[in-house]
């Protein structure tokens, strides 16, 4: 089926530093999402991105978070500065239409020390 | 927004029997209800979904039921196999911009 690629699979970073998580969505998809999953818990919606803009974000999407997809390349999630509570697995997802069939990447495990 | 409750959190079933997971949602405007299966260290994979214009959908040993009046939907795995052992998440969404609201998950273990 359609594949969403996420790079890197694991990132270890010191608190206060910046981190960028990269997502290569399915090629013809137009809607992009980030979800956060703390170990053993459910995935929680962070943000939805369409047509170069953030469409909606949750209260988990703090001011330190930003997303972009410059020139159709990677869809990125940047956290600057990172905090200990940002440690989680971040899943990227994409969708081709408004009908909400989301395909998820394998996730990036972020460890903030 | 949306809130999704999922029960049970843990489900142990004997191989060959069926497993049922139940979810409820709050937002009556939600119209899309997917189910994802997640194995340890892997991404969640869509296994079946149902939209609000249907009450029942079946595919390859999976049945989903939707009761819009009760705001309840359920997944039934028939003839469970060891490969069905995983975390299962239900989700609900009202529109594309809101993304999906997930339940807390059900850890299904199929034993011989």
Image: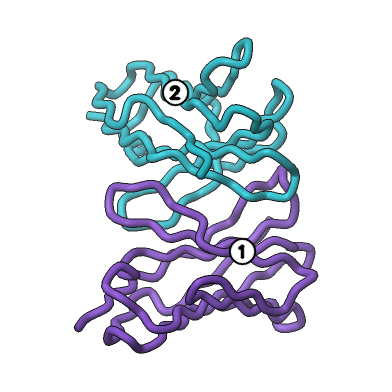
Chain colours: A cyan, B purple
Q: Are marks 2 and 1 on the same chain?
A: no
| Residue drawn at 43 percent across, 19 percent down | A80
Q: Secondary structure at mark 1?
A: strand
Pointer 2 and pointer 1: residues touching (CB < 8 Å)?
A: no
When asked about the image quadrant of residue A49, the answer is: top right
Q: Which residue is mark 2?
A: A22
Q: Disc 2: which chain?
A: A
Residue A77 x/y as whole percent:
49, 25
Q: Which mark is residue B49?
A: 1
Task: Work out which residue is located at the far front of the displayed protein and give it.
Answer: B60
Q: Residues within 10 Å of mark 1 (few under 14, many from 20)?
A: many
Q: Secondary structure at mark 2?
A: strand
Residue A9 position (above or below residue B30): above
Residue B50 x/y as whole percent:
66, 67
Residue B63 position (above or below residue B16): above
Gap between marks 2 and 1, in whole Å?
A: 28 Å
Left or right, B53 with reference to A35: right
When asked about the image quadrant of residue A9, the answer is: top left
Q: Disc 1: which chain?
A: B
């Amino acid at each position: 089926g359609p594949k969403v690629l996420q790079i890197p699979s694991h990132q270890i970073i010191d608190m206060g530093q910046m981190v960028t998580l990269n997502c290569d969505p399915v090629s013809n998809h137009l809607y992009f999402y980030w979800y956060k999953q703390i170990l053993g818990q459910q995935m929680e919606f962070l943000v939805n991105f369409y047509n170069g803009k953030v469409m909606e974000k949750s209260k988990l999407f703090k001011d330190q978070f930003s997303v972009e997809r410059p020139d159709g390349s990677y869809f990125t999630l940047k956290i600057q500065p990172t905090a200990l509570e940002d440690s989680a697995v971040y899943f990227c997802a994409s969708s081709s239409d408004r009908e909400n069939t989301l395909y998820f990447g394998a996730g990036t495990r972020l460890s903030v020390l | 927004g949306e809130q999704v409750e999922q029960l049970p959190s843990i489900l142990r079933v004997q191989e060959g029997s069926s497993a049922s997971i139940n979810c409820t949602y709050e937002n009556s405007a939600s119209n899309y209800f997917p189910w994802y299966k997640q194995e340890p260290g892997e991404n969640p994979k869509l296994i079946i979904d149902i939209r609000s214009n249907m009450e029942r959908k079946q595919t390859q040993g999976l049945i989903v039921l939707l009761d819009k009046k009760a705001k309840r939907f359920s997944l039934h795995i028939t003839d469970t196999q060891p490969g069905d052992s995983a975390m299962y998440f239900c989700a609900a969404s009202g529109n594309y911009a809101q993304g999906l609201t997930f339940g807390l998950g059900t850890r299904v273990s199929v034993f011989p």
